[in-house]
Amino acid sequence: MINLAVIELKDIVKYLIRITLIIVVVVFLTKYFSNFKTKLNTQKNSFLSCLDTVVPSIKTVNKKDENINTSNKIEPLKLALGIELGVIDSIEQDSNDTTQMENQVEDNIVVNEIDDGEIQEAETGLKTEVLKNNVPEKYTSEYNGVKIRNETDNIKLTKEMLVPEVDINTKNILIYHTHTCESYTPTENYKYKKSGNFRTKDLNCNMARVGTELAKYMKHYGYNVIHDTTIYDSSYSESYDRSLKGVAKLLEENKGTDILFDIHRDAIGDSSYAPTVKIGDEEAAQMMFVIGSNGGGSEHDNWNENLKFAIKIQEKANELYPGLFKPIILRDSRYNQQLAKGASIIEVGATGNTMEQCLASMKYLSKVLSEVLK
């Protein structure tokens, strides 16, 4: 006996329709989740890129460490947790700060009206020693002992780009602070009311005090100094926009100014990091140049001259006080350095350092500058 199964045409059509619908749904879902993943990655990259611009120091964590010379391993998670994210969360938002800041610019400019006090010029020929810390030294290029860490995406440094031949007008030195409220580990002489994580509006205990010390020494060496102590970072994310307006105004009033020092501290936000160099019997906070560029696509014709000027200063520092400076960092962001050909950020110490150590650094930095600029 033979059993025959009879399949009607309409059953075949129903079956094919079901299969087709399943295939369409699978294709749609696959495409949807693929696009969703791409969108998430794009948003993530945009967010990180935004952080690199608004919170420049976090780029230390975001940037790949490919082709970077290093003798030690660093703990990226610990470093990332210490970066300026805590700063953003903890800044006091005073509703009157913006108006107050806009009205402050002229009131907080000091031009050579600085009390010399007791000036003790830095000695030379002293033994120097970099004290051990938990962040290793990294660099990608070197010129005559000056190390440079290139964190840009597209700029390839050549030897010609590093030769420190640059013509700088030394008529004026303009010192200011985009992140004025950055501060250090409090001491008996420098206690302060906090306005955030290692931050204070007390001008005697934040970056303005460091700038005042440098201004005092440079005036002693015979230079015309303009020191802007305006608090530009009451709104942290807008600090560079604000300092751009303030410094541009000062440059308009003091034409021919080439030298702009934006004095900061390192952004690592805990007391465990205190880069220090011992010079003779005195401890001083290590410093670091941060140089901007046009690598991010913004116009910046002065970046290579800024870099050369920093190299020239660090060459002399290496000669007089080896270890006073950490490797120069070159980044894509401009940091308002397009305003002059002798512009730079100088990071003085970190949160683990004390104000006393940072003031000592200004004594040695001023000696270096007096030798370079004469």
Image (spheres, rainbow, N blue to C red):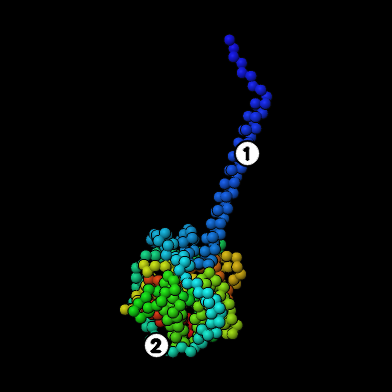
Mark 1–mark 2 distance (CA, rounded to whole Å): 81 Å
Residue type of the residue flagged with mark 2: Ile
Q: Could you say whether the residue bearing mark 2 is in a helix, strand or loop?
A: loop
Residue 150 at x, y = what percent?
Answer: 50, 65
Residue corresponding to mark 1: 24
Mark in front: 1 vs 2 = 1
Residue 261 at x, y = what percent?
Answer: 50, 78
Residue corresponding to mark 2: 119
Residue 55 higher or lower than 16, as above or below: below
Residue 202 at x, y = what percent?
Answer: 44, 79
Most extreme residue toward the left, as rendered? Answer: 281
Q: Residues within 10 Å of mark 1 (few under 14, many from 20)?
A: few
Q: Nearer the viewer, residue 260 or 48?
A: 48
Residue 150 is marked as none
Q: Residue at x 49, y 61 (%)?
A: 63
Q: Quadrant of the N terminus?
A: top right
Q: Is residue 285 left or right of residue 15?
A: left
